[in-house]
Amino acid sequence: MALTDIDNDSMRDPEASSTTPAPSTGRRRLSRRQLYTRRYLRNRPAVVGLGIFAILVLFAVLGGLIAKHDYLATDFMNLSTGPTPDHWFGTNDAGNDLYAQTVHGLQRSLIIALIVAAGSTVLAAVIGASAAYFGGPYERIVLTVIHFLMVIPTFLILSLFSNSSGGDWKVIAIILLLINWFFPARTVWTLSLSLREREYVSAARYMGVGGFKVVLRHIIPNIGSLLIIQFTLGVVGAVLAETSLSFIGFGVKAPDVSLGSLIGGGADTITSSPWLFYFPAGALTLLTVSMALVADGLRDALDPTSAAGGRA
């Protein structure tokens, strides 16, 4: 009876119950997104770069709402004048407001860059990963095309087609897209060669999952960190390519404007009207530097071997 009473008392005592939860260590597991976010936020230059990029995007989207003039409007009473309360960035020799043109030019350059970066990243992921997974003749054909495109002078081809397009920014974006996918596609192919031998890929294949479904669901998601960094760097590359084309006269043409065309026009009058060069060049510099800082931060945050990952 005594043993029974003791046993019953222990069953009633919550502290003596075997179902008492283990003491908490005070730590909670972070999700992958929270871990990546914490790693990124510990990188101060990357945070600064993201802030600058956000400000530039807001400037491109909302800057036109506070502009006093349209970017195509002409003020014949103020030809090639410096910054004034009425023309914040000054005017060019045709009387166009440089502030409004800088806002529109930044908007146009960002649109082209985002289209090119997103499109080339998607093409590189699908083509490179599928070539590695399927192998055989398909892989040989893809690699032959990639290696051929890597050795031809793409800038000359880009200049030729851009000049024949009449400066249409949509045609320029498509041309930049078509010549910017093969470099990252070869990198994706290299990484996917090892992924196709993983157990989960073999299991999906044995279960009868289609080849392209395996590529889209199992291979590409496992190189997502590379694709994110590639997209970020692709924005920088597309902006510089578009700017270079417009600077030498093969890119966006009047009446439309981009940062490259503004810089090209301002370079001819940099001694007499320096504001025509410095304001668009400053916007371009801030854009490329901010995206480079963001790319470095993403690389450190997504790479488990980086120093930022260890501190997180």
Image (cartoon, rainbow, N blue to C red):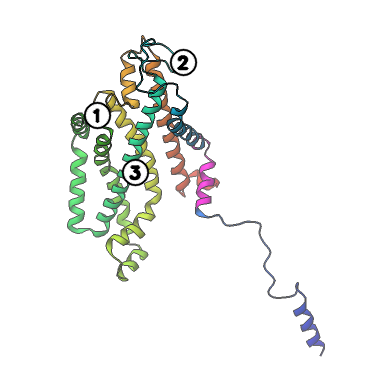
Amino acid type at circle 3 is Ala
Judge left or right: residue 34 versus residue 149: right
In-front residue for pair 50/21: 50
User: Which quarter of the picture shows residue 261?
Assistant: top left
User: Residue 118 — which label?
Assistant: 3
Judge left or right: residue 20 versus residue 276: right
For label 1, the crowd category at 10 Å Cα-Cα, with few meaning under 14, some 14 to 19 and many 20 or more, is many
Q: How far apart are marks 2 and 3 (CA)?
A: 38 Å
* Tag 3 secondary structure: helix
The image shows residue 124, relative to residue 18, as above or below, that is above
Amino acid type at circle 1 is Gly
In-front residue for pair 121/106: 106
Amino acid type at circle 2 is Asp
Residue highlighted by disc 2? 86
Residue 130: x and y in percent read: 27, 56
Q: What stretch is highlighted in magenta?
A: 33-46
* Tag 1 secondary structure: loop
Based on the picture, tell me whether residue 257 belongs to the magenta stretch: no
Q: Residue furthest bottom?
A: 1
Q: Which of marks 2 and 1 is nearer the N terminus?
A: 2
